Amino acid sequence: MVTLKSALSLPLIGLLVACGGGTGGGATTGTFSLGVSDNPANVTGVTVAFKQVVLKGEQVFSFDVSDNGAPQQVDLMQFTGAAIEGLISGKQVPVGDYQLCIYVLNNTGADPSKSFVETSGTMEGLVTNSNGSCGGVGGVDEEGVDEENGTGRLFFNKPFTIAAGENNYVAEFNLEKGLLSPRGDKAYWTLKPTAVQIINNAEVGSISGQIGSTLRADCQADAGGEFGDRVYLYPNNSALVSSIDPEIKQMVDFRLAEQVVAMEVAPLAASAVEEVLDAEGNTVYEYEFGFVAAGSYSLGYSCLGQNDDQEVDNMPTGTATFSLFSEQSDVVVVPGQGAERDFFVDPT
């Protein structure tokens, strides 16, 4: 069902996900296409139950995305790297700037009809810790609008523009950075609203490559214990250690912003390393960043990604800590193109 707070009629095929600020528009329209993707986390499934989307510009559009009262559930872990779940295709909307709110069903238990996280066969609830309306519309239902028991809100305030012509966007959930495991006496997960960003496909490219078997084995032999392969994306000119002081680790893990000190650089995103078969039937280990803004980057490889907590410095000396094993630099991303960079012991 689609409810519009305007004279414009928009059929809704799937879920609208966008963001922005300001107003604009007029008689001119542009086509709007949208998909959803994510960067993975150390879990097996992240299902978000989408209920309502409100798009606010000069007009306000309210979209009920439920199916006969049931929310639209999407397992974000099925759409990693450059994989996209197509949600909106070629819809006519007024040109201009928008703000947008997405409403999801929070879940503090193990209700499979709402939002939840799966880890090793265990289901736990998922909430987003923001609520409220978008332009006076959305977020109010019989369950209430609180963090733990009702409807959660993902609110986007970065300017989002629909221009004349084709507009292809992706809403990317950075789960590695913004999905928090249960804390304290809470038995459910939390999705930070800041873990989602809107990306214009015309302005991004991709980075992909392989991790050599020998390099993986060397990392595992050096680390010991359990392993979780990750490739981390950093601003260019980042390195494993500082060029000024080799005792300082420059590339660090995900952590709270206030925990990043001088000469340290936190990652922008992370990609899981997947075991796949190549055309000859050989086992290879691949990673991919699907939506990267144009520019130059550095990469870091770790086989201890499972120890990276988004809100904790995991790099001190001790057990179950995080470290990076190998680096790459000067990876250039061009809009609409894919950059390739492999991690091998022998570059040849």
Image (cartoon, helix red, strand yellow):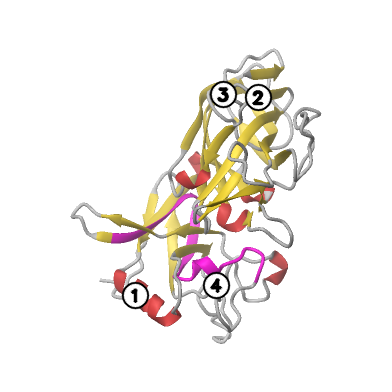
Q: Quadrant of residue 326?
A: bottom left
Residue 179, above or below 325? above
The residues bearing labels 4 and 1 have C-alpha atoms spaced at a distance of 21 Å
Residue at 69%, 65% (x, y): give it.
257
Mark 3: amino acid:
Gly
Mark 4: amino acid:
Met
Does dot 1 land on a helix, a strand or a loop?
helix
Pinpoint residue 26: horizontal percent, then vertical percent.
Answer: 68, 19
Q: Nearer the viewer, mark 1 or mark 3?
A: 1
> Where, quadrant-wise, is the N terminus in this rendering?
top right
Q: Earlier in the sequence, mark 2 or mark 3?
A: 3
Residue at 52%, 44% (x, y): give it.
76
Residue 318, above or below 189? below
Mark 1: amino acid:
Ala
Residue 13, above or below 216? above
Q: Which residue is mark 1?
A: 217
Q: Earlier in the sequence, mark 1 or mark 2?
A: 2
Residue at 50%, 74% (x, y): give it.
239
Q: Earlier in the sequence, mark 4 or mark 2?
A: 2
Name the side, left or right, on which 225 lies relative to 267. Answer: left
Residue 30 has which mark?
3
Q: How many marks?
A: 4
Pinpoint residue 180: horizontal percent, then vertical percent.
Answer: 64, 57
Determine if the magenta segment contains residue 226. Answer: no
Q: Which residue is mark 4?
A: 251
> Magenta: predominant secondary structure element?
strand
Residue 63 has which mark?
2
